[in-house]
Amino acid sequence: MNRAALYSVLFTCMFFFGNACSSLNHGPPPEDEPPPKAVICKALSFNECAASAGCELMSAVRYEVDRGCRHPAAPVACVSGPEHCPAVLTYARDLQNNTWMFPSGCLPGGWSAFEAREEDRVAISGLECSSGGGVEPACSQRSLEECEALEGCTLLSAGRYDVERVCRYSLAPVACAAEDTCQPSTVYAKDLKNNRWVFPSTCLPEGWEGVVAEDKDRAAVRGPECQADGLY
């Protein structure tokens, strides 16, 4: 083999093995990094939403028509932003039928918009409910627990009786009423389930109906106490 051919063979071997070593020293080329996971805004908490790029908090004002007052604005949902919402005041109900006012036409999923009535506008323009604003519910709208602690309200107690078994039950509180509206008197009445009761005053719970007492009513009221496990 002449010298030129020998140099050609040596060069070819050096080139081949040199590239192979270079590949061994540096390893395979790096793979592309996976793309970041997409953020689902509606699945975030309000704190996470405020700190997440691409998400925005949706806020609204809840109000109470019965009390004529409003609550402070509060976040109600996390949405993908920026939302292209029409700048129009929107009244809506949430899934629990609470009433809200939004500063735009965008609503959380499942909420329904409705046409505002005069009482809605009065409530949203009223004082904040948390500051004692609004009209306090009447005694008749209070629970039995609240009634005991409220000045000007009194518990209505009555005795239920059974004309079929000719017996009576123990006196029990049934409703709350304004203190100055009840006059002492024996009044017979029926509740919403048609059970019969006797009251020591003229005040009856809302929806209950006074009845004219018959002999069977008076006999049951004068009878022994009803027992759950027998006739008396």
Image: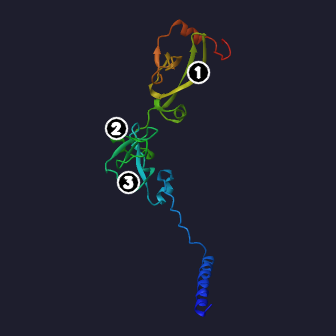
Q: Is residue 20 visible?
A: yes
Q: Which residue is mark 2?
A: 119
Q: Nearer the viewer, mark 1 or mark 3?
A: 3
> Badge 2: how crowded within 10 Å, few (<14), some, or many (20+)?
few
Quadrant of the snapshot with the C terminus: top right
Front label number (3 vs 2):
3
Q: Residue 125 in the image: x percent, y percent? A: 34, 45
Which label was assigned to residue 83?
A: 3
Colour approach in the figure: rainbow
Q: Residues within 10 Å of mark 3 (few under 14, many from 20)?
A: few
Residue identifier under label 1 = 171
Residue 167 x %, y %: 61, 12
| Vertical relation: 168 (above or below) 30 | above
Q: Amino acid at mark 2?
A: Glu
Count residues near mark 1 (Cα–Cα under 10 Å), then give few for <14, some for 14-19, many for 20+: some
Q: Amino acid at mark 3?
A: Glu
State the image quarter where residue 180 is shown: top left
